[in-house]
């Protein structure tokens, strides 16, 4: 299984860190920070202007600095069959 990792920024310290993606949709990205028993799940939702995704983990805000359109394009590139919906007859 190929795990996808993305880079997020902790807004308070401006540090970047790699996190593992559990689920990626245009309206929500679920990620896991840490490994093993110390891992924590987080949901990143689009900001109001749609230029980034933001979420909170243990009182700290993290930001994924890609727009909603860029994430949707990434999803379409990985699996183009998802957007080609055909109705069964």
Image (spheres, grey):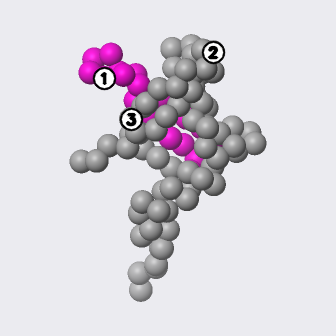
**Residue 48: image location, x then y, percent:** 74, 39
Q: Position of residue 28 (x, y in %)?
A: 54, 43
Residue at x 46% of width, y 79% of height = 87
Q: CA distance from mark 1 to mark 2?
A: 22 Å
Q: Residue furthest left?
A: 1
Residue that numbered label 2 is attached to = 12
Q: Mark 1 = which residue?
A: 35
Q: Are marks 2 and 3 in contact (CB under 8 Å)?
A: no
Q: Is residue 25 above or below residue 19?
A: below
The picture quadrant where one finds residue 19 is top left
User: x, y (%) of residue 74?
Assistant: 51, 55
Instruction: Say which residue label 3 marks.
Output: 20
Q: Local crowd at mark 1 within 10 Å, few (<14), some, or many (≥20)?
A: few
Residue at 27% x, 17% y: name it: 37
Callout 3: 10 Å neighbours few (<14), some, many (20+)? Answer: some
| Residue 30 highlighted magenta (yes or no) | yes
Q: CA distance from mark 2 to mark 3?
A: 21 Å
Does 52 appear in magenta?
no
Q: Which residues are magenta?
A: 26-46
Q: Earlier in the sequence, mark 2 or mark 3?
A: 2
Residue 41 at least partly seen: no
């Amino acid at each position: 299984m190929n795990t996808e990792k993305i880079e997020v920024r902790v807004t308070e310290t401006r540090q970047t860190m790699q996190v593992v993606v559990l689920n990626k949709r245009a309206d929500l990205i679920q990620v896991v920070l840490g490994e093993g028993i110390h891992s924590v799940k987080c949901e990143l939702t689009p900001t109001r202007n749609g230029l980034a995704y933001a979420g909170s983990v243990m009182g700290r805000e993290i930001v994924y600095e890609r727009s909603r359109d860029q994430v949707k394009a990434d999803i379409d590139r990985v699996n183009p069959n998802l957007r080609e919906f055909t109705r069964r007859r």
